[in-house]
Image (tube, helix red, strand yellow):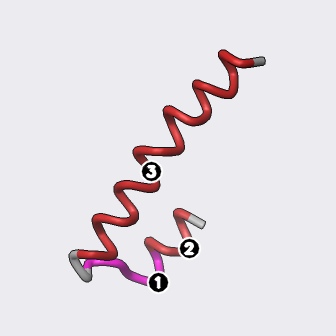
Amino acid sequence: MKIVGAQWKAENVPQYLKLRCAYLNGAIAPGVASLVA
């Protein structure tokens, strides 16, 4: 269970950072927002 949780977290964190980076750069678009969400 811990390993599965760690794998999910390892995949989820980079996605969040990428979204945050795009938001800070003002490069976020409705299509991207809906895709991530």
Q: Secondary structure at mark 3?
A: helix
Q: Which residues are magenta?
A: 27-31
Return the x and y of residue 36 as percentages of the image width and height.
53, 63
Q: In the image, what residue occupies the spot 53% across and 44% down?
A: 12
Give the distance between the C-alpha atoms of the residues marked 1 and 2, in whole angstroms: 6 Å
Q: Nearer the viewer, residue 32 or 18?
A: 18
Residue designated by label 1: 30
Q: Is residue 14 above or below residue 17?
A: above
| Disc with the residue nearer the chain's start (3 vs 1) | 3
Residue designated by label 3: 15
Q: Nearer the viewer, residue 19 or 33?
A: 19
Return the x and y of residue 16 as percentages of the image width and height.
45, 55
Give the distance between the C-alpha atoms of the residues marked 2 and 3, in whole angstroms: 13 Å
Left or right of 12 on screen, residue 24? left
Give the distance between the C-alpha atoms of the residues marked 3 and 1, in whole angstroms: 16 Å
The mark closer to the camera, 3 or 1, is 3
Left or right of 37 on screen, residue 20? left
Residue designated by label 2: 34
Neighbor class of circle 1 (other Cα within 10 Å; few <14, some 14-19, many 20+) is few
Magenta span main SS:
loop
Neighbor class of circle 3 (other Cα within 10 Å; few <14, some 14-19, many 20+) is few
Instruction: Residue lying at the far right in this picture: please name it.
Output: 1
Q: Secondary structure at mark 1?
A: helix
Label pair 1/2, CB-CB below 8 angstroms: yes
Q: Is residue 1 above or below residue 15?
A: above
Check if residue 13 falls in the magenta segment.
no
Instruction: Residue lying at the far left in this picture: please name it.
Output: 25
Type of amino acid under label 2: Ser
Return the x and y of residue 8 as percentages of the image width and height.
61, 33
